[in-house]
Image (cartoon, rainbow, N blue to C red):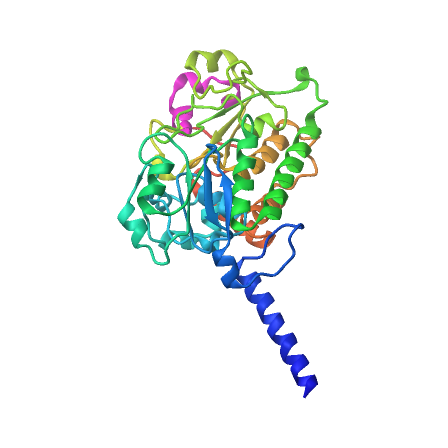
């Protein structure tokens, strides 16, 4: 009889452990290894200081959350807690193929919406079932402030300030750490930060010793805003070029916020290689970079166009920043600008590794599937030379 009791206790203990892990409510830190029951977890709260310096009390490891604004779902997917999302920002219903996290989680499109960032529908939020325990908001001016949204819904609101891959990477890392602490994914947050730092270091080290005079000049055009993807739109610190120490003709360390250059400037610079961010076919037309390169006679005279050195790339800026695609783009740009330093890179394999780690919970086969789907974003092929008649 004592033997049966021993077995029963062992089985029950195992079930408790398994159910706790499935619910995602074990502290993800080395400092705390204790197992908590579901009831204990639900009543436990922690105090978080968000990106705006607000102090917010939230339930530890919430099971149900929503994210308002660009980037929130991306970071929750990186943290491997996308299964706790119960509704999405209305903007997420738009084209998903340019966003790796949305491709990996295509079921997001079937989720209910609660309005858009700055114009959240309070009645819809309060009617959600299950009810979100935490609202993450990618803070922008206009609309409800985080405090107003919290007061009107009685749901804790964590405001996050999105950074970028070059000038404000620490802001991006802060998002991962704040979300990681709330969601019980502290260790995963640090894994992500290490992955980004290690990958960016690899890109940098490959070309750090190449003299400027040996580098081809280059330019990234069609870098998106919400309404225009014209050739003159760029990023003076475009990550894919910045990480590999490329000779970007638009680079300006004194004015890092340059988002558009003049036509006269690009004609004078005459870059040897041009990279274009591709967009879905709905954006085709006279304000789309590939169309302009093909139909504007002055652009036809650029050396890159004349010599067949224009390449389409997946968009880094597509519903805010896409850090995963920035890394894939950087490895591709490296193979074009520094073929010797990147001769070991097989882009498909690298893309599967990046997307697999960031949005597919380490499954590189699924990462490859995400990459292949992403390539369908445009009728213009990505990562091959563009042809103009």
Give the number of callouts: 0
Q: Residue furthest left?
A: 123
Q: Is residue 87 left or right of residue 172?
A: left
Which residues fall within the magenta stretch?
289-305
Q: Is residue 87 visible?
A: yes
Which image quadrant: the N terminus?
bottom right
Q: Is residue 373 left or right of residue 111?
A: right
Give the percent coordinates (x, y) of residue 34. 63, 58
Q: Is residue 37 above or below residue 136?
A: below
Residue 115 highlighted magenta (yes or no): no
* x 58%, y 57%: residue: 26
Residue 291 highlighted magenta (yes or no): yes
- For the stretch drawn in magenta, the main secondary structure is helix
Q: Is residue 371 visible?
A: no
* x 64%, y 42%: residue: 346
* x 54%, y 28%: residue: 168
Observer-nearest of 112 and 32: 32
Q: Quadrant of residue 209?
A: top right
Observer-nearest of 63 and 259: 63
Q: Is residue 347 above or below residue 208?
A: below
Q: Is residue 128 above or below residue 7?
A: above
Give the percent coordinates (x, y) of residue 66. 40, 48
Q: Is residue 176 left or right of residue 9?
A: left
Observer-nearest of 273 and 100: 100
* x 48%, y 57%: residue: 43
Q: Is residue 115 left or right of residue 222?
A: left
Observer-nearest of 15 and 328: 15
Give the percent coordinates (x, y) of residue 241. 58, 26
């Amino acid at each position: 009889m004592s033997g049966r009791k021993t077995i029963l206790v062992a089985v029950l203990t195992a079930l408790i452990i398994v159910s706790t892990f499935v619910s995602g409510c074990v502290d993800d830190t080395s400092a705390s290894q204790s197992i908590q029951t579901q009831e204990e977890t639900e009543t436990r709260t922690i105090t978080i200081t968000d990106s705006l310096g607000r102090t917010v009390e939230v339930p530890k490891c919430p099971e149900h959350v929503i994210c308002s604004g660009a980037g929130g779902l991306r970071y929750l997917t990186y943290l491997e807690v996308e299964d706790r999302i119960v509704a999405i920002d209305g903007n997420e219903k738009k084209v998903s193929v340019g966003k790796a996290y949305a491709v990996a989680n295509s079921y997001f499109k079937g989720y209910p919406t609660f309005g858009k960032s700055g114009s959240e529908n309070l009645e819809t939020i309060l009617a959600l079932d299950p009810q979100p325990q935490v609202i993450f908001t990618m803070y922008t001016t206009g609309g409800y402030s985080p405090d107003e949204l919290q007061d009107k819904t009685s749901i804790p609101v964590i405001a996050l300030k999105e950074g970028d891959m070059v000038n404000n990477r620490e802001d991006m890392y802060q998002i991962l750490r704040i979300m990681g602490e709330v969601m019980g994914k502290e260790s995963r947050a640090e894994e992500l930060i290490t992955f980004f730092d290690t990958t960016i270091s690899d890109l940098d080290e490959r070309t750090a010793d190449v003299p400027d005079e040996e580098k081809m000049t280059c330019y990234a055009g069609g870098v998106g805003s919400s309404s225009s993807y014209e050739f003159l739109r760029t990023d003076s610190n475009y990550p894919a070029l910045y990480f590999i120490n490329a000779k970007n003709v638009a680079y300006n360390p004194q004015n890092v916020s340059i988002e558009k250059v003049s036509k006269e400037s690009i004609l004078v610079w005459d870059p040897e290689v041009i990279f274009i961010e591709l967009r879905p076919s709905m954006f085709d037309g006279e304000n789309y970079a590939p169309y302009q390169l093909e139909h504007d006679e002055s652009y036809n005279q650029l050396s890159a166009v004349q010599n067949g050195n224009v390449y389409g790339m997946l968009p880094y800026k597509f519903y805010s920043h896409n850090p995963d695609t920035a890394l894939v783009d950087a490895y591709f740009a490296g193979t074009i600008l520094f073929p010797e330093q990147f001769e070991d890179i097989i882009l498909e394999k690298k893309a599967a590794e990046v997307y697999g780690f960031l949005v597919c919970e380490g499954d590189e086969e699924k990462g490859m599937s995400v990459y292949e789907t992403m390539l369908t974003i445009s009728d213009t092929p990505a990562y091959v030379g563009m042809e103009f008649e």
